[in-house]
Amino acid sequence: MENKAQSGHRLVLVPCPYQGHINPMLQLGTFLHSKGFSISIVHTHFNSPNPSNHPEFTFFPIPDGLTADEISSGNAVAIMFTINANCKASFKQCLTDRVTEQEPQNKITCIIYDEFMYFSESVANDLNIPRILLRTQSATNFIARNTLIRLHSKGCTPFPDSMSLNLVPELHPLRFKDLPISIFDTLENVLKLMANGHDVRTSSAIIWNTLDCLEQSSLAQVQQQCQVPIFSIGPLHKIATAASSSSLLEEDTSCIAWLDKQSHNSVIYVSLGSLAFISEKELFEMAWGLINSRQPFLWVIRPGSVCDSDGIELLPQGFSEAVGERGCIVTWAPQMEVLAHGAVGGFWSHCGWNSTLESMSEGVPMLCRPCSSDQKVNARCVSQVWKIGLQLENELERGEVERAVKKLMVDDDGKGMRVRAKDLKEKIEVSMKGGSSYHCLNKLVELIRSF
Ligand code: UDX
């Protein structure tokens, strides 16, 4: 990509080292670079992005102090605590070195950091550099998190099972079971991590990877609660048109040739993102449900996503013979390209916020199977607010999977969802072309240039 950075404004971006956070931060970097800013990415050794995919940025790794045991535990909450405890000094050193070696015309104008990399804020304060927070999850999830923190502080958690289907007061249509509780750690620790990312008093602004047309009322509520401007500039993967892949796993692009051979809107794409996992029994029920639906499918079975196994070797006996050419299985896909492909007519998703935005931007209706935290909020919004998908709520069973896939893809009673998904795609396009996201992007660029 042509290096257009000429403004003399250097921005330091600090992504949280998980796929669902790295992607939007690097996409934001690509957009800001196209507006003339120089971009430096300061990142942990853990899950470090590949600099060769982004020659337009400069990369600065900092030691994160994570042990092999912590990494292999897979406890994302504990990992984030360790990173925040360990990275403050190394980040400060990295910036101080940069500041002292800098030409005055290339000083650091601003630090943009992921809300879960909150150590960045105190470093920015110490060095007197303006800072902006990036939130990569939905605004509705933020409100739900606040409610959860409040209910916990009043001693209302854990919620009894009998309440799980009750609507949460003031959060309709969210039920207690949809609140963003994580499976990775205790509620106490998860809420502490969330609360640490909530303090934005000294930030200049919040960038939110969402859109007014999706979350107008949630965004208005959040804006009322905080003193700093909020820029809802999503969907970032569409704003950054020239963004290269920032996948941590290698993408298997052979699935695009397979998609090329399928009919329009016929394929259900199945992927549970970068962290969600399922049991062996669920894998079996998914497999037979997909086969019995008779729809072609492209299925991402990520290593480790089936309870610590490689997954593919667990597929039921007779599966490959039954599938034949009708199924394609890969370990990691070029997801944005897949969702934009004309052959894809539905997305079975864990409803990570990036996957949800990527699906909506292409007008693809969703079959929602959330696993943890914000995915539950997103799944509920997809099925009950935007009404562009349905949620698989019960224990996975092949008959139910088959019915749901058919409803999503072909049956008459799913037509409304499919039409609304296409309408929403158009609204998102309007937001980007002269609408709310476009205006927020312009205001954001103006603000950064004013520092
Ligand atoms: C999780 C949360 O669910 C998410 O909401 C939160 O903000 C970050 O942590 P994750 O499981 O990674 O995220 O899901 P998601 O937010 O959907 O991000 C996954 C990213 O990986 C997407 O951008 C998707 O395009 C990409 N992906 C996924 C691929 O490129 N290939 C694949 O095969 C699967």
Image (cartoon, rainbow, N blue to C red):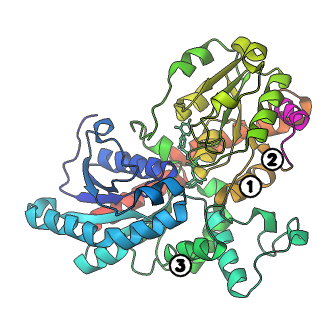
* Residue at which label 3 appears: 226
* Disc nearer the start of the sequence (2/1): 1
Q: Is residue 90 left or right of residue 425?
A: left
Q: Is residue 281 left or right of residue 111?
A: right
- Vertical side of 80 occupied by 343: above or below: above
Element type at mark 2: strand
Element type at mark 1: helix
Marks 2/1: CA–CA distance = 10 Å
> What residue sits 50% from the left and 76% below the top?
196
Between marks 2 and 3 in the image, the one whose residue lies nearer the viewer: 2
Q: From the top left corner, tell me how far across and down residue 396 is, in percent.
A: 83, 43
* Disc nearer the start of the sequence (2/3): 3
Give the amino acid at mark 3.
Cys
* Magenta span includes 405: yes
- The image quadrant of residue 55 is top left
Element type at mark 3: loop
Q: From the top left corner, tell me how far across and down residue 333 is, in percent.
A: 54, 31
- Residue 172 visible in the displayed image: no
Between marks 1 and 3 in the image, the one whose residue lies nearer the viewer: 1
* Residue at which label 2 appears: 391
Q: Which residues are magenta?
A: 395-407
Check disc 1: other Cα within 10 Å, few if <14, some if 14-19, many if 20+: many
Q: Are marks 1 and 3 in contact (CB under 8 Å)?
A: no
Q: From the top left corner, tell me how far across and down residue 45 is, in percent.
A: 33, 53
Q: From the top left corner, tell me how far across and down residue 56 is, in percent.
A: 26, 41
The quarter in which the N terminus is drawn is: top left
Q: Which mark is residue 381?
A: 1
